[in-house]
Image: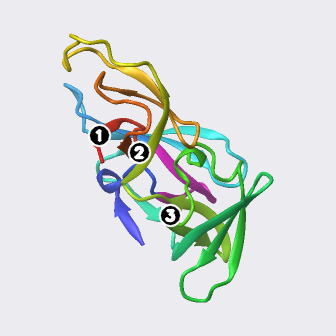
Amino acid sequence: MKISAFEIKVGNLIEHNGRLWRVAKTSHVKPGKGGAFVQAEMKAVDDGTKLNERFRSEDKVEKAHVESRDMTYSYADGDQYVFMDSKTYEQLNLSAEDLEGQVEYIIPNIEVIVSFYNEKPIGLQLPGTIVLEVVDTDAAIKGQTASGSGKPAKLETGLTVTVPTFVNIGDKIKVNTDTGEYIERA
């Protein structure tokens, strides 16, 4: 399916120069002279090489046909993460390398969407937010206001985020899985 260059979004899989690419960053640029364009940073799915490509507004790109399956995370086996298909109950192993940057958001029984390209798993889509427990942070000091810059907090999965000063050990917080930022207490 062909899409306009301005429809490219972060996380999209596109076919370009005979390879499959995952879009990591995009920026829309409207220079003073000349036509508008999209600057896209992409990463090859097969070997991880990066490419910065400029697409003009009239360019069309081929969006890869990807099959998505609803799956549930079951358990970790060494550096392998085992997911179960919600419909067929088949199990799928993905390595920590396959889940680069997403491992810190994976907790037991989390519902995810696994993308397949030519029957090969190529990516994982997490929910937009996830609730995690704070396991280590500095104690709040009496008299501090909530308008401070925040403090680091280590979460149950090993992820460290900046939280407001009123968040304590044992609190459950909601974290944005795209940016890794604190949203609110849960």
Q: Residue furthest right?
A: 78
Q: Could you tell me what secondary structure mostly forms the magenta stretch?
A: strand
Q: Residue at x 40, y 19 (%)?
A: 139
Chain-order first, disc 3 or disc 1: 3
Q: Residue at x 36, y 54 (%)?
A: 128
Q: Are marks 3 and 1 in contact (CB under 8 Å)?
A: no
Q: Which residue is mark 1?
A: 183
Closest to the camera, between mark 2 and mark 3, is: 3
Residue 26 falls in image quadrant = top left
Q: CA distance from mark 1 to mark 2?
A: 12 Å
Q: Residues within 10 Å of mark 3 (few under 14, many from 20)?
A: some
Q: Position of residue 73 (x, y in %)?
A: 59, 66
What's the residue type where badge 2 is placed?
A: Asp
**What's the colour scheme?**
rainbow
Q: CA distance from mark 3 to mark 1?
A: 19 Å
Q: Say left or right for 91 vs 138.
A: right
**Quadrant including the N terminus:** bottom left
Q: Which mark is residue 171?
A: none
What's the residue type where badge 1 is placed?
A: Ile
Q: Position of residue 136 (x, y in %)?
A: 51, 28
Q: Which residue is mark 3?
A: 110
Q: Which residue is mark 2?
A: 178
Q: Position of residue 42 (x, y in %)?
A: 53, 44
Bounds of the magenta span? Answer: 13-24
Q: Are marks 1 and 2 in contact (CB under 8 Å)?
A: no
Q: Residue furthest front?
A: 142
Q: Are marks 2 and 3 in contact (CB under 8 Å)?
A: no
Q: Residues within 10 Å of mark 1 (few under 14, many from 20)?
A: some
